[in-house]
Image: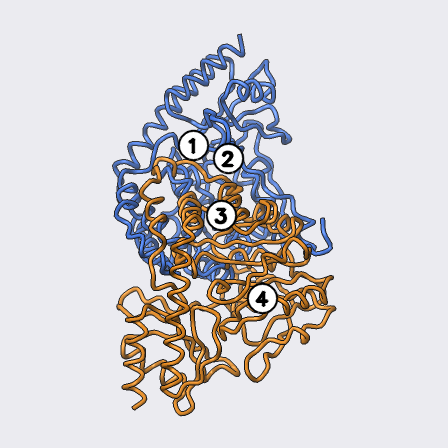
Chain colours: A blue, B orange
Amino acid sequence: MSKFWSKIVNELDPYVPGEQPQDQQYIKLNTNESPYPPSPAVAQALADFDCADLRRYPDPESSRLVKALAGYHGLTPPQVFVGNGSDEVLAHAFQALLQKPAPILFPDISYSFYPVYCGLYRIEFETVALDASFCIDVNDYQPGNGGIIIPNPNAPTGIALEIGAIKRLLERNRESVVIIDEAYVDFGAESATRLVTDHDNLLVVQTFSKSRNLAGLRLGAAFGHEALIEALQRIKNSFNSYPVDSLASACAIASLNDEAYFEQCRRQIIASRAHLSESLAALGFEVFPSSSNFVFVRHADRSAQSLYLDLKSAGILLRYFDKPRIDNCLRITVGSDPECDALLKALNRILS
Amino acid sequence: MSKFWSKIVNELDPYVPGEQPQDQQYIKLNTNESPYPPSPAVAQALADFDCADLRRYPDPESSRLVKALAGYHGLTPPQVFVGNGSDEVLAHAFQALLQKPAPILFPDISYSFYPVYCGLYRIEFETVALDASFCIDVNDYQPGNGGIIIPNPNAPTGIALEIGAIKRLLERNRESVVIIDEAYVDFGAESATRLVTDHDNLLVVQTFSKSRNLAGLRLGAAFGHEALIEALQRIKNSFNSYPVDSLASACAIASLNDEAYFEQCRRQIIASRAHLSESLAALGFEVFPSSSNFVFVRHADRSAQSLYLDLKSAGILLRYFDKPRIDNCLRITVGSDPECDALLKALNRILS
């Protein structure tokens, strides 16, 4: 605290990302990174990149990348926005579309950055409780709200909503913006991008961090009606004219152009998830049905916190949330098969 | 305008960066980019970068880069902040340190992003007029303000303040944060980073875009008292946990380690600026004394707008600002010597 701080700085309760130890080598199953490298096309794009071009500012509109994303999703460029990671895109969306007189709604168990954005932009919010099996019932989201944001699949539960439920949510809340945060959609849920053209209140947010194995690149995108995208552009152009650097654009376009590799990684993670889920169940864990690149589990006999600490000592990092309702659960990123096997072996030892 | 927009979106008057034509080849002397490629060490860092690392999130604290910058400037890591371009760093600084009950102060002719940030964060401001020769008099900045931001050298005038004047400004305004925006400092002004340790109200902002030839990388930094840096960290951690991507960190560190190349480019631009300034004066331009990588000029007989348009037709882009007091001036980036010669040749033709 300092006399020089703006009032808002004292009010903030910043987001705490999963541990990123810089010193020690862990088996990192705590931040939902991919166990696989980016597409070889990304390495090629980096090798082909003319370093001399870095002396120039990037295209402030990221036109080539926006066009590539529009083509990929069957949309037009004015329906597409890109930013420096989906966290930046979400931040702009909260400021541009969710700063409303009525409170916004999101699930009580969800991405823990949402209440942080509300603090940053002084947005009132109400949380809507998941049911006992950690599922979202869209009927619980009552009109009259200032906006709705729901991850699909939800995090940290991994449980997906059917596209029909999202459609009902959009149609019941025609006066509110509904943001579907699809960070994990490629691992088993259906994307709402195909609803964008017919629903002027829908914004879909995606990331290159998970299913495109590019967390280190910082690239996120939003898809929505032109008027919603224009609101994001106006915020972006009042914040940072050039949020997406030239290297990130080149790598992202290369990734989008290699559909075969994308499919291969996606399918491998889905297969590893099935094996990991069965093995964890056999060890006495309750495993929630995951449509993402992580599984959410709890054990009948052992506290999540003690398991988290025992595994950390064994060199394996999981994500533990000290929060109501989920403080006895663990979120486990689906790693490579050898990483999953190392986890299962360590758990076998710890639990026996 | 849309019913879905937050109120702030309607109020914004976004920043308009210099033209970045994607279609046509221009001699671009309009956005103060370097005519030289980044250090060969940057190309080497890119070649050495293991693309597989992109699957991981970057270090959220950018510890290696922060340590390198601290060492470079003789500061400690808690006195250093990094972000996705100095525009992002400035945005966070406005929100973290300048959102105060009293209006903030900046020059009437200055970086045109400042009033945009004030709009984004609803900050009251008053501008302080430059004198008739476009110089800043620090005695005009009266205590009782909510903060002060001054570019040194100023943009778009290119005129620098002496370090003694900045010290007087800091000492006279001990209750306000004073931000010195040093985007262009390496081309002829003295950096205030050496005042950081003794002045708890000073924040210095720098960029890798200009003197490090890395505009395409998006990297900016701030230097200040630990409490000021903590305020920026709190905003950053409530906005985007990982603003600096892994490639940008690696390239920036490589650039910092190649002091000889940095000196060589800097000196070349200073030499080219001297030649360009003399030649423009010989063509009838008034040339303001520049300490940056651009010159600010006006012509006795020809309007700036007509010269801007004639040169654009001739394939040369300059920056023209349709703003009070400077609407008869042009800002010309110091390009390579062949680029400057092409400009002088075109002007010779247009003016004769």
Find disc 4 in the rendering and name its residue. B119
Dot 3: what SS? loop
For residue B11, say whether it is visible: no
Dot 2: what SS? loop
Can marks 3 and 4 be said to lie on one chain? yes
Find disc 2 in the rendering and name its residue. A155
Find disc 3 in the rendering and name its residue. B243
Q: Which amino acid type corresponds to the residue marked 3 in the rendered image?
A: Pro
Task: State whether residue A101 is above or below residue A253.
Answer: below
Q: CA distance from mark 3 to mark 2?
A: 22 Å
Q: CA distance from mark 2 to mark 4?
A: 34 Å
Camera-near label (3 vs 1) is: 3
Q: Residue at x 30, y 86 (%)?
A: B350
Q: Residue at x 26, y 68 (%)?
A: B25
Find disc 1 in the rendering and name its residue. A292
Label 1, residues with CA under 10 Å away: few <14, some 14-19, many ≥20: many
Say whether marks 2 and 1 touch (CB < 8 Å): yes
